[in-house]
């Protein structure tokens, strides 16, 4: 048996933790973060409230863990997208498609982040969370910028500042995604259109 293989008890603990987080996310989404109690989360997850407190000391910790797990998922998947096979143009397009897919698949967590004001979460929790989330974001922008820089060197992209190209792509995709979040029917996310708008002026290898 491998030393790093989880025991049955450890697997059960991870499963319980995941069920608690899912229950909390669903309730936060339905009723609003401020209107949900730990007792309600325990009931939704079908655990005793005492079991809930064995995993999370309070509602703020649950909130932070939901967002941190989402951030780590985004960071891992988007980093991998930038490392896929193909030239830099293909990698940037893969990054864009992956980002849009992740955003839509994790819309409950995204909405939670934007719906909870700092007044409802303790200053220390919010400050620590913002610092960690910002670190994930900065690292991703730097990785995206590095791909643009290599593409510029290969004369795939126009010689523009790679960091600002990364910021520009991120901002354009965010604009489409936030419109979709407000009204999916009116504003469907069209990655082909985003690509056309963004790459029209910087991609040098048009057919």
Image: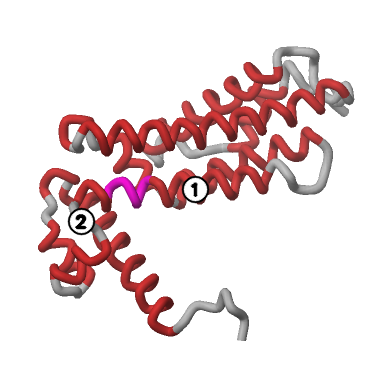
- Rendered-image quadrant of the N terminus: bottom right
Q: Residue at x 32, y 72 (%)?
A: 16
Span of residues in magenta: 63-67
C-alpha span from label 1 to label 2: 22 Å
Residue 117 in picture, x, y percent from top left: 22, 32
Residue at the spot x=86%, y=25% of the render?
205
Q: Is residue 44 above or below residue 184?
A: below
Quadrant position of the C terminus in the picture: top right
Label 2 crowd bin: few (<14), some (14–19), many (20+), radius 10 Å: few
Would you say residue 108 is visible in this rendering?
no
**Is residue 60 at least partly visible in the picture?**
yes
Please give the label number shown on residue 72: 1
The x and y percentages for residue 41 are: 18, 62
Please name the residue that numbered disc 2 is placed on.
Answer: 57
Q: Nearer the viewer, residue 85 or 37?
A: 37
- Residue 116 versus residue 65: which sits nearer the camera? 65
Q: Horizontal placement of 117 versus 14: left or right?
A: left
Q: On the image, which quarter does residue 178 sit in? A: top left
Q: Is residue 64 magenta?
A: yes
Query: Where does the image place residue 126, in percent across and percent down from the top left?
Result: 28, 34
Q: Is residue 202 above or below residue 151?
A: above
Disc 2 secondary structure class? loop
Horizontal relation, residue 153 to residue 109: left or right: right
Which marked residue is nearer to the observer: mark 1 or mark 2? 2
For marks 1 and 2 on the same chain, the one whose residue lies earlier in the sequence: 2
Q: Is residue 179 left or right of residue 60?
A: right
Magenta stretch contains residue 86: no
Residue 138 tag number: none
Q: Secondary structure at mark 1?
A: helix
* Residue at (31, 60) in percent of width and height: 21
Magenta-colored segment: predominant secondary structure = helix
């Amino acid at each position: 048996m491998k030393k790093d293989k989880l025991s049955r008890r450890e697997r059960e603990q991870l499963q319980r933790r995941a069920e608690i987080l899912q229950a909390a996310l669903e309730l936060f989404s339905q009723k609003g973060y401020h209107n949900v109690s730990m007792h309600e989360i325990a009931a939704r997850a079908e655990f005793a409230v005492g079991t809930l407190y064995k995993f999370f000391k309070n509602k703020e910790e649950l909130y932070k863990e939901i967002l941190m797990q989402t951030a780590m998922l985004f960071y891992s998947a988007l980093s991998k997208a930038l490392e896929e096979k193909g030239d830099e143009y293909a990698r940037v397009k893969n990054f864009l498609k992956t980002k849009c897919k992740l955003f839509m698949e994790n819309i409950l967590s995204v909405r939670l982040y934007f719906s909870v004001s700092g007044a409802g979460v303790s200053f220390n929790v919010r400050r620590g969370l913002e610092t960690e989330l910002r670190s994930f974001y900065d690292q991703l922008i730097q990785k995206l910028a590095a791909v643009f820089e290599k593409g510029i060197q290969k004369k795939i992209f126009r010689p523009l500042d790679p960091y600002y190209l990364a910021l520009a792509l991120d901002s354009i995709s965010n604009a489409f995604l936030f419109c979709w979040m407000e009204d999916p029917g009116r504003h469907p996310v069209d990655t082909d259109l985003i690509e056309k708008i963004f790459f029209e002026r910087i991609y040098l290898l048009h057919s």
